[in-house]
C-alpha cells in the first residue's frame, strides 16, 4: 500500500471493517497484526472498529492474552565413556539412514515427478538453517556452482520484491472490492505495474496471490425468494433465444429485475435490484424486511426517477408474484413499460439479474450486517463501488457507469 496516501474512515467500507473485526474476534489475528496485514493507518483504528462493531468486550486493548509455557527440566546423570560411544554410534547410523532416505526421495522427485529442489535448497543455505554449513560445501552437495547459486539468489530476491509490491497493490484495491477476481485485478493493475517496471502476466499473478492466500474462494448459498405459483397473469419471455428475441443495443432499452436475500444477525432482509441489461449498471435498488409488492417496487421507482431517455423500455423478471401483481403492473402501464417474464422458475432465463446478485453478495456483502439499517448502508456502498469502480469483462473491462453515461441520452 502507498505510504504517502493518508486515509480516512470513509476509505474503508463497512463490509471491510466487519471482515477485519470477525478475523480478530475469531483469534485469527490480533488487532495490531490486522493493521499491519491490511495496511490500515492509525494506531487504534482497528480497535475503534472492534469497540463499535465487535461482539466482545474490547475495553482492554491488549488483544490476545499471552501465555508463558515453562518446560520442565529433567534430571540427567552423566554417561560413561562406553555409553557415550554407543550413543554416538547409534546417532551416526541413524543420520546415514536418514541421509540415504532423503537422497532416494529427491531422486524419485526429480526422475518421476520432474520436481527441482534448487529453490528450497537455496532458501536453506540463505537462511543459514545449518550454522556450520558453508556455501561452498552446500553448492558441492547440491551439484551446482557458487555462481549459479548467487545468480539464483538475486533472481529470487527480485521476484520476492515484485511479489511484495503486487500484493500491496492488490490489498489496496481489495479495501473497497474485497473479492475482486484475479483477471480483473490484472487489468486494473496493469498500468501501475508497467510504471514500476514490473512485468507480470495473468498466470504469474495467480501464483503470487495463491502464495499470499489472496485468491477468491467461491461461496455457495441458496434461499428461495420467488413464488411463481399464483393466479396473476404471466407475460411472454421477450429475451428468449429465437427469431423474435429482443437484444438491447444501448442503455435503457432492457431492464432486468430480481430479488435476493441478505442474512443479518436477526431475521433475513431482502434486496430488490433493477439492472440495465446493456451497461450492466444497477439503476435501482432497495433493501426491505418483507416480500410485499410495495417494498419490492421501490427499486423500480428509483430506477425510473433516474431514467434519462424516453425510448421504448422492456422490464424483464421472473414470474414471482410481486412482479405479476396488479400493483406492479400498474407501474408498467403508468410509465409505458413493456413486460417480459421467464417461462417458468428457471434462473437461467434471468441470468444477468442472477449474476449481478451473485457479484454483490459474493464480492462485496461478505459480512452479516446487524440489522436492516446496517444492511441498507452496506448495499448503498457496494452498489456505488460496483457501478463506478468494478471493471466488467463483458464491457471490455470498463465500468458499468462509464458505459451507461457514454451511450445513454
Image: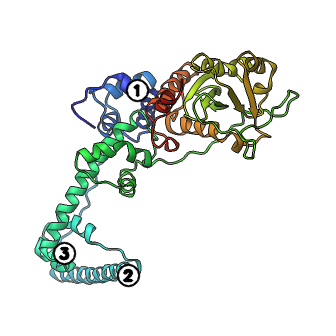
Say the numbered circle drawn on residue 50. Answer: 1
The N terminus: image quadrant: top left
Query: How far across and down, in percent of the image, does residue 216 sit?
Result: 47, 47
| Residue corresponding to mark 3 | 79
CA distance separating discs 3 and 1: 57 Å
Say the numbered circle drawn on residue 108. Answer: 2
Q: Along the polypeptide, which appears first: circle 2 or circle 3?
A: 3
Closest to the observer: 380 or 315? 315
Element type at marker 2? helix
CA distance separating discs 2 and 3: 41 Å
Closest to the observer: 239 or 246? 246
Crowding at dot 1, Cα within 10 Å, few <14 / some 14-19 / many 20+, comes out as many
Please indicate whether residue 222 sits to the left or right of residue 118 in the image: right
Element type at marker 3? loop
Q: Nearer the viewer, mark 3 or mark 1?
A: 1
Question: Splitting the image into 4 quarters, where does residue 13 fall?
Answer: top left
Query: How far across and down, in percent of the image, does residue 127 sit?
Result: 19, 61
Amino acid at each position: 500500500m502507498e505510504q504517502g496516501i493518508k486515509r480516512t474512515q470513509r476509505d474503508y467500507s463497512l463490509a471491510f471493517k466487519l471482515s477485519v473485526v470477525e478475523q480478530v474476534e475469531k483469534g485469527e489475528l490480533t488487532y495490531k497484526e490486522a493493521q499491519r496485514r491490511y495496511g490500515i493507518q492509525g494506531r487504534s483504528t482497528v480497535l475503534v472498529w472492534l469497540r463499535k462493531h465487535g461482539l466482545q468486550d474490547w475495553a482492554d486493548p491488549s488483544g490476545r492474552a499471552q501465555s508463558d509455557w515453562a518446560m520442565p527440566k529433567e534430571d540427567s546423570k552423566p554417561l560413561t565413556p562406553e555409553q557415550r560411544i554407543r550413543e554416538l554410534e547409534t546417532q551416526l547410523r541413524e543420520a546415514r539412514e536418514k541421509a540415504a532416505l532423503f537422497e532416494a526421495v529427491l531422486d524419485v522427485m526429480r526422475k518421476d515427478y520432474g520436481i527441482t529442489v534448487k529453490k528450497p535448497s537455496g532458501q536453506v543455505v540463505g537462511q543459514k538453517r545449518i550454522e556450520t554449513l558453508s556455501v561452498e560445501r552446500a553448492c558441492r552437495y547440491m551439484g551446482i556452482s557458487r555462481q549459479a547459486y548467487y545468480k539464483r539468489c538475486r533472481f529470487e530476491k527480485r521476484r520476492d520484491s515484485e511479489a511484495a509490491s503486487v500484493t500491496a497493490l492488490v490489498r489496496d484495491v481489495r479495501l473497497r472490492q474485497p473479492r475482486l477476481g484475479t483477471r480483473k485485478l490484472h487489468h486494473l493493475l496493469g498500468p501501475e505495474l508497467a510504471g514500476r517496471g514490473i512485468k507480470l502476466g495473468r498466470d504469474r499473478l495467480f501464483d503470487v496471490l495463491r502464495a499470499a492466500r489472496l485468491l477468491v474462494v467461491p461461496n455457495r448459498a441458496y434461499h428461495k425468494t420467488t413464488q411463481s405459483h399464483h393466479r396473476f397473469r404471466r407475460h411472454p419471455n421477450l429475451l428468449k433465444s429465437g427469431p423474435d428475441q429482443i437484444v438491447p443495443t444501448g442503455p435503457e432499452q432492457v431492464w432486468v429485475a430480481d430479488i435476493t436475500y441478505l442474512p443479518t444477525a436477526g431475521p433475513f432482509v431482502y434486496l430488490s435490484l433493477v439492472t440495465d441489461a446493456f451497461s450492466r449498471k444497477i439503476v435501482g435498488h432497495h433493501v426491505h424486511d418483507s416480500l410485499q409488492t410495495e417494498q419490492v417496487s421501490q427499486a423500480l421507482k428509483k430506477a425510473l426517477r433516474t431514467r434519462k431517455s424516453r425510448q421504448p423500455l422492456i422490464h424483464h423478471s421472473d414470474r414471482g408474484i410481486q412482479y405479476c401483481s396488479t400493483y406492479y403492473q400498474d407501474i408498467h402501464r403508468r410509465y409505458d413499460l413493456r413486460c417480459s417474464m421467464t417461462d417458468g422458475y428457471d434462473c437461467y432465463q434471468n441470468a444477468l439479474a442472477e449474476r449481478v446478485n451473485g457479484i454483490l453478495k459474493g464480492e462485496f456483502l461478505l459480512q452479516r450486517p446487524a440489522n436492516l439499517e446496517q444492511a441498507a448502508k452496506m448495499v448503498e456502498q457496494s452498489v456505488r463501488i460496483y457501478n463506478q469502480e468494478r471493471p466488467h469483462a463483458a464491457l471490455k473491462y470498463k465500468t458499468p457507469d462509464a458505459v451507461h453515461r457514454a451511450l445513454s441520452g
